[in-house]
Image (cartoon, rainbow, N blue to C red):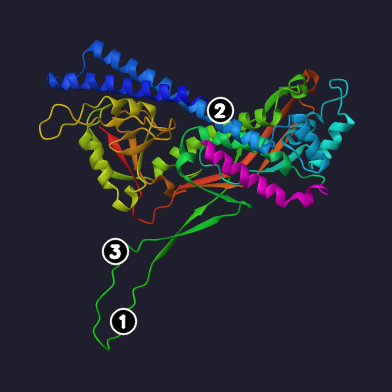
Amino acid sequence: MDITNLVELREEKGRLANEADQILVKAKEEGRSDLRDDEDKKFDAIHADIEKISKNITRLEKQEATRSSLNESQGRKTTHNDTDTRQQARTFGKITEHDRVEAFRAWALAGVPDEVSEGLSDAQLATAKRCGINPDSKRLKISMGPVLRSDSPEDMRSWQTQVDEKRAALTGLQSTTTTGGYTTADATMRALEVALLAYGGMRSVATIIRTDTGGPLPIPTTNDTANKGEIIGENTTYNELEMTFGQLVLDAWKYSSKYIKASVEFLQDSSINPAEFIGTALGTRIARITNDHFTTGTGSQPNGIVTAATSSAVTFSGVASVTADNLTDLIHAVDPAYRVNGRFMFHDGGLKMIKKVKVLQYSGDTVGVPLWIPGLAAGQPDRILGYEYVINQSMTTPATGVKSILFGDFSKYLIRDVRDVTLLRLDERFAEFGQVAFLAFSRHDGDLLDAGTHPVMYGTQA
């Protein structure tokens, strides 16, 4: 990672944020409630540049995280080149990342007719067998493994370590299994997991539960906040006060990625990681639909966070505007116990609306603290009134009557994944075109864990 470049990007982000602040300050000093057209255009242009810089920072950090994770998983901790590393691994019976990619490639190409493909070599078949894959099977079961909560370098390395430890525990089984596939899960499922995490925002803040089966999963709930103890006198019998329990039941809705097609030439190209490509493509498709449902689902599918949240009785002033007082009221509508981990959630249109709120004033000062504060240090997020926020494009843009802004502890939203993902290879359907189709099925559910204490609340646009 080019540290100097990242430092310069963050410094430029801070400079632009200050420049945008000055536009708001000038309007405030001149007693204007709105920006002039030229100021409005300049303000939007500045924040467009800030968004580009933020994306560049994220891109550089993601690339370093991916590079570090792949280097560690491929054993690049010495000065040996890749060929030496793979040869040493085979000598000692270890399955490398290269082996897993080639095993997946063999499985992906196994159903292609000989007149279309060159067929699988003995080396490819041997690699597939070592990795526990039966190329003749059209169905591949792969485990999603541990939960990846973010794509920071530290979390990527932690996630990879957990995968490696679990794979090591199964080493004794890999030599005998014929229809396995866990050893290929690394490249495929990491790509799918990153795609799921990156799209929409719900997975980055919710609590992820992974189960091995898809039966109903009851989660007990109780609200004991109104119950208190008592003072009792000497030699006095104590009283009983029972707790009342309820339950939240998570199901397992079945999702399909719809199939994708890949040419034989693409799958044969040794410079391409087909597992990563397919995992990313399928993960993005499933992420789009599940994030929609985790956000606005009706309950006859996952119950979305917007649907499950409680009204704060806060009405934002204007069809597409908000005030500092509105946001403060929304924050304090949530119990202090949930404000410790509290954050905002809104569509990108909601962020734009908040960024244009005029500068706060204190004790009559004309210059105060802006609502939106950019994070300039490494790993420091942007904040609004001191709280982090999540952009969720599955939420509706601010409009009359819309639940436009959420606030609360989003870790109380539970997402359930049924651990195994089924990957199907469709051989014959597109064989005449020299293509192979792939289709993924996975099962998920989601709901807000609310025993009556309302950890997440919403405000409504006027």
**Mark 3–mark 2 distance (CA, rounded to whole Å):** 50 Å
* Amino acid on which the number 2 mark rests in the picture: Gln
Eyeballing the image, is 279 above or below 159? above
- The Cα–Cα distance between marks 2 and 1, rounded to whole angstroms, is 62 Å
**Disc 3 on helix, strand or loop?**
loop
Q: Give the range drawn in magenta.
A: 151-177
Residue at 74 percent of width and 38 percent of height: 96
Instruction: Give the residue number, with chain letter if any, for mark 3.
Output: 226
Of all residues, the one furthest to the top in this rendering is: 38
Q: In this view, does 245 lie above or below 79?
A: below
Closer to the camera in the image, 300 or 170: 170
Nearest to N terminus: mark 2 or mark 1: 2
Instruction: Give the image quarter of residue 43.
Output: top left
The answer to whether residue 144 is magenta is no
Dot 1 or dot 3, earlier in sequence: 3
Residue pointed to by mark 1: 238
Q: Quadrant of the C terminus?
A: top left
Residue 115 visible:
yes
What is the quadrant of residue 37 in the picture? Answer: top left
Question: Label 2, on which residue?
Answer: 63
| Nearest the eye: 14 or 419 | 14
* 101 sits to left or right of 247: right
